C-alpha cells in the first residue's frame, strides 16, 4: 500500500510539473509591445533625427578619444593589408598626466573624478534603440554578394575606418596553420564558403559554417513592421 501511495503521489507531482511548464506566459513577459505607429512614420522620424544622433555620438567619441589617423610605420594587422594605429587613444582630463594618475590611489582618482572617460562604458550610438550597426564596407560587400541590405535608416557606424580591423578579415585555421590566411582576401558568406573552405575543413566544420553564415532575422533586420532597415530583410549572420 505505501508503495502504491508513493507511485500515485509521484505521478500527481509529475503531472502538476508538466502543467506548470506548459502553462503559457503572459504575452508581455516575452515580447515587447508592437509598434504603435506605422512603419512609414517611424522611418521618417528616425531619418529626421539621424543627423542629430550622429553628431552627438561623434562629439562623445571626440571628447573621449584621439581619433586621428596615425599609423605605425611598418606595422600591419595579421592580414597584412591595414596599418596598426600608434599611441594611446584615451584622452586625459585637463591638467592630468599618466604619471600623475600612476601616483594616485584608486580611491583618490575616484574621489577627484579623474578617471578618464575613455575607460568608462561607451554607450551605443543610439542607446535607447541599440542593436547591430555595420560599417559601410561590410554593408556594401554583403549587398554585392547576397543582395541583403544591412544599412539602418536611424544610425550609421560611428568609428572612423582607420580605427577598425582590416576587412575582409583574414582566416587562420588552428588545425592547418601551414596554410596561413585561407580567406583568399574575400569575405566569407553563404555564397562562397563552400568554394573557399572545401578540402581544408571537416564535414562537421563545413556544416557549422553553413549554419553560421545563413541569414537569420533579428530585431533590426527582419520581415515584420518593426525593422530598422528600409527593406524587408532576411536578417544577419
Image (tube, helix red, strand yellow):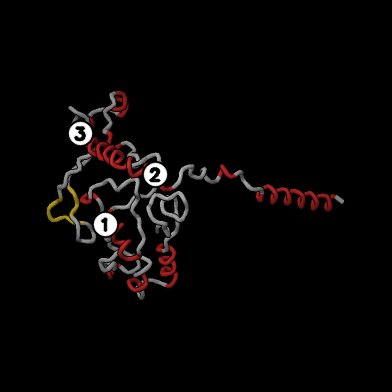
- Quadrant of residue 182 within the rendered picture: bottom left
User: Is residue 117 at all visible to an observer of this figure?
Assistant: yes
89 and 148: which is toward the camera: 148
The numbered dot on residue 130 is 2
Q: Which quarter shows the C terminus? A: bottom left
Q: CA distance from mark 1 to mark 2?
A: 21 Å
Q: Spot the residue most to the bottom.
A: 199
Measuring 47% from the left and 53% from the top, which residue is drawn there? 224
Q: Which residue is mark 1?
A: 137
Q: CA distance from mark 3 to mark 1?
A: 36 Å
Local packing at callout 1 (Cα closer than 10 Å; few below 14, some 14-19, many 20+) is few
168 and 116: which is toward the camera: 168
> SS of the residue at dot 2?
loop
Q: Are marks 3 and 1 in contact (CB under 8 Å)?
A: no
Measuring 37% from the left and 42% from the top, which residue is drawn there? 45
The numbered dot on residue 97 is none
Local packing at callout 2 (Cα closer than 10 Å; few below 14, some 14-19, many 20+) is few
Measuring 19% from the left and 60% from the top, which residue is drawn there? 81
- Using the image, determine if residue 31 lies above or below residue 201: above
Estimate the x, y position of residue 59 in percent, counting from the top left.
Answer: 25, 37
- Using the image, determine if residue 232 lies above or below residue 122: below
Q: Which residue is mark 3?
A: 98
Query: Which of pointers 3 and 1 lies earlier in the amino acid sequence?
Result: 3
Q: Spot the residue most to the right.
A: 1
Estimate the x, y position of residue 158 in percent, counting from the top left.
Answer: 28, 45
Residue mark closest to the camera, 2 vs 3: 2
154 and 197: which is toward the camera: 154
Amino acid at each position: 500500500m505505501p508503495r502504491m501511495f508513493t507511485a500515485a503521489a509521484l505521478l500527481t507531482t509529475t503531472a502538476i510539473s508538466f502543467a506548470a511548464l506548459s502553462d503559457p506566459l503572459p504575452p508581455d513577459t516575452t515580447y515587447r509591445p508592437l509598434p504603435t505607429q506605422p512603419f512609414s512614420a517611424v522611418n521618417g522620424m528616425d531619418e529626421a533625427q539621424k543627423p542629430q544622433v550622429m553628431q552627438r555620438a561623434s562629439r562623445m567619441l571626440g571628447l573621449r578619444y584621439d581619433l586621428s589617423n596615425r599609423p605605425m610605420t611598418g606595422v600591419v594587422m595579421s592580414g597584412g593589408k591595414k596599418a596598426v594605429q600608434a599611441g594611446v587613444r584615451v584622452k586625459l582630463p585637463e591638467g592630468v598626466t599618466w604619471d600623475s594618475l600612476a601616483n594616485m590611489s584608486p580611491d583618490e582618482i575616484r574621489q577627484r573624478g579623474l578617471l578618464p572617460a575613455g575607460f568608462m562604458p561607451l554607450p551605443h550610438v543610439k542607446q535607447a534603440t541599440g542593436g547591430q550597426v555595420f560599417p559601410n564596407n561590410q554593408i556594401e560587400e554583403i549587398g554585392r554578394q547576397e543582395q541583403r541590405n544591412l544599412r539602418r535608416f536611424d544610425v550609421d557606424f560611428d568609428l572612423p575606418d582607420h580605427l577598425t580591423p582590416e576587412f575582409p578579415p583574414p582566416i587562420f585555421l588552428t588545425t592547418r596553420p601551414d596554410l596561413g590566411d585561407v580567406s583568399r582576401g574575400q569575405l566569407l558568406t553563404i555564397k562562397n564558403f563552400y568554394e573557399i573552405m572545401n578540402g581544408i575543413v571537416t564535414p562537421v566544420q563545413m556544416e557549422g559554417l553553413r549554419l553560421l553564415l545563413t541569414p537569420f532575422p533579428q530585431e533590426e533586420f527582419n520581415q515584420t513592421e518593426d525593422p530598422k532597415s528600409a527593406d524587408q530583410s532576411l536578417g544577419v549572420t
